[in-house]
Image (tube, helix red, strand yellow):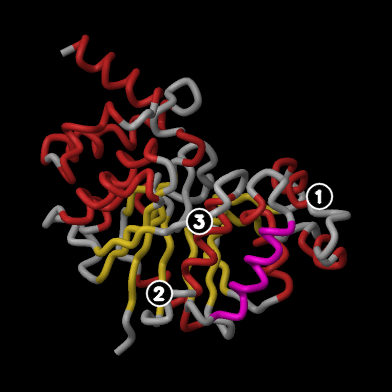
Amino acid sequence: MSRDVVMYLNTGPSHLANQAVSAHSLRRYWSGEVLIAAWPQSRDIALKIARDRRIDASTVVQEVAYQRKNAQEIAKISLIQKMTNYDRVVYLDADTIINKPLDPLFNAIDASPTGFAATQFGAWAMPQGIPRKRVECLRGIPGIPEDLVEMALLPGRPSYNSGIFACRPTSPVLPVWGEWTTLSKHIYISGETALHLVARKFEIVTMPNGVWNCSPMFQSRTLPDADVGIWHFHGDCNVRPRKSQRGLNLWWPEFELARKLNIGGIAEWADQIGNEYLNELILNHKQTV
């Protein structure tokens, strides 16, 4: 029997409320091992969340020298390669709500010859403007294969999001992905962008149509809410109603439940983590109660 784990990585503390909410939702569908990795600045609260008996996660503090642009992308790829005590890893960004059992993600690892499964972001595909412009930024970067850039831009190619993926720590995809993410670290979300090239170089499994990476802003028209496996609240769209009221509507009841149950002590620290959008919502809620 394989040893499996669901893992998160927390860098700055502003997303720790997301972490508590996501881990709480995860435990409805996953009774196996959970690893909450954290940088030193997030360690104390990450430990409180992990040690809550309803979360029951292990923790690791990741010391990193580079903490600038795309550091989180680089760090998570590096960390997973060191987790060889596990057979299969599902990585989740903290700004997620799990809506179904994760078996399809773990099974996709086994179905991939390279032990790697990526998630399509909604129904995004080439040559849509946003993903196309991002991948085009890889052109001319030394060490980035130009032929793969052009292959990734071909019409119909899916667009990926690196906030949710599944792999073996020994997958040959990871070292190459990490290298290209580092080479392009000066561009916007280099890990996510480089993932489009990885999908052309290696035979990976693609989880399609946003089922396992569903944005409340860019949900596929063919994907009903009941079929969503994971909601992904990218760009703080769970706490920015002007950006996505739907994102807030989906996330806020889960946050309120986590506060009521005081998951990881969230009732004491939710307004102390430097998330200005969340602080405004908490204040407005207090004023209307």
Residue situated in front as seen by the camera: 183 or 236: 183
Is-magenta flag for residue 82? no
Seen in the picture, residue 21 relative to 32 is either above or below; the reply is above
Q: Is residue 229 visible?
A: no
Can you give x and y, in whole percent of width and height, for residue 80 in the image? Answer: 47, 69
Residue picked out by circle 2? 106
Tell me which amino acid carries mark 3.
Val
**Could you tell me which residue is drawn at 20 percent across and 37 percent down?**
266
The residue at the far top in this view is 287
Q: Is residue 212 left or right of residue 65?
A: left
- Spatial CA span between label 2 and label 3: 28 Å
Residue picked out by circle 1? 136
Tell me which amino acid carries mark 2.
Phe
Can you give x and y, in whole percent of width and height, for residue 53 in the image? Answer: 11, 57
Mark 1 secondary-structure assignment: helix
The residue at the far bottom in this view is 1
Mark 2 secondary-structure assignment: helix
Quarter of the rendering containing residue 61: bottom left
